[in-house]
Amino acid sequence: MTGASLPAVEAPRLTAHDRLDWTIGAVLLVLLAALPWSGADAYITGLAMKAMILAIAAISLDLLIGQAGLVSLGHAAFIALGAYVTGIALEEGLYDATAILALVIVISALFALITGAISLRTSGVYFIMITLAFGQMLFFATASLSQYGGDDGLTLWSTSELFGTSLLQDEISLFLIILATLALTWIALARLSKSRFGRVLNAARQAPVRVETLGFEVFRYRLAAYTIAGMIAGIAGFLLAHQAEFVSPAAGAWQRSGDLIMMVLIGGIGTRSGALLGAIVFVALEEGLSLVLHEWRLIFGPLLVLLVLFARGGLMAALSRLAGARD
């Protein structure tokens, strides 16, 4: 991935928005870390773990949307893929967590590489539709696995062992492992966005032809981003299988991909903390509104419209305006 230097990819500087992003991210992570010792019951802790797992996937999706300008409606397929690889491995007698995680990463990467190589030949609405098609293919493929539960899903009667211990079976240990994975994902993608790779992606989103003429192969950069995002979402699926102790084709449904996009929009596109905040708000609203009305999306839809109208740029943009952040 070589090429001439670009004015659009000059050395980054830490802006007020960047500092706000890091501050909000750090505050949210600290609050989450304190949750197990705050007296919260298992129900609240379980919701927090679900939100963190979805945040990992949402942050990876933000790499595509915020950096590369690629809106994928099949991103949840990678979550389902990671969950099913985990579930099938356990069913077949493989209990080593590191071995299962390695399988998840390799298989997710291969699936992303193959589907991305095809999908990235298109753009705009065509890219959205082809990612949706691949996502639906995986959805129906998992639903057809009758030996692993089919439409009903697969209950995991045991979970994997981490270095010969039962850490993944203990709720507090699993919580901390999910939190550590979230923090590492957040930091890694924040640094990636400011690296040469991230700046080329961002420049290609704004002026792909110009970037190509200066010697950067946009397709390869986008494919690498798509593969990285797929692997991270696969890891989220691995964690989801351990947290829920159940895997289902519903994890890869297009509606879940739509939920991930909404999380990114709610928090603010192009900010890791936005995706994290969006996931927390989404799960809180989903759970809270479902207690009021079974069809909770009838309330959530208008709330999302109001957010788009009055908090343009998402919650992070609103917080930035309140803080008076300037570039």
Image (cartoon, rainbow, N blue to C red):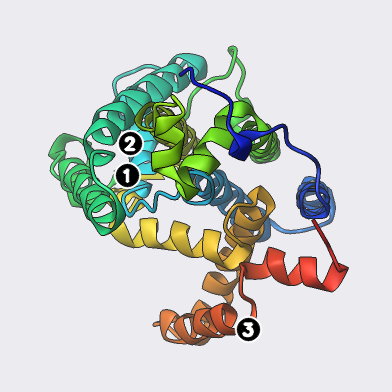
Q: Is residue 287 left or right of residue 70?
A: right
Give the amino acid at mark 1: Ala
Q: Quadrant of residue 212?
A: top left
Determine contact: label 1, label 2, CB under 8 Å.
Answer: yes
The image position of residue 118, as x and y in percent, is 21, 35
Residue 77 disc label: 1
Where is residue 154, by image quadrant?
Answer: top left
Q: Label 2: which residue? A: 81
For the residue carrying disc 2, how many other residues have a C-alpha within 10 Å: few (<14), some (14-19), or many (20+)?
A: many
Secondary structure at badge 3 equals helix
Q: Earlier in the sequence, mark 3 or mark 1?
A: 1
Q: Position of residue 58 (x, y in %)?
A: 52, 50
Q: Quadrant of the C terminus?
A: bottom right
Q: Which residue is mark 3?
A: 310
Please give the label number shown on residue 15. none
Residue at horizontal 46%, vertical 46%? 207
Q: Residues within 10 Å of mark 1 (few under 14, many from 20)?
A: many
Q: Is residue 279 above or below residue 131?
A: below
The mark that comes first in sequence, 2 or 3, is 2
Q: Specify the quadrant of the image occupied by residue 266.
A: bottom right
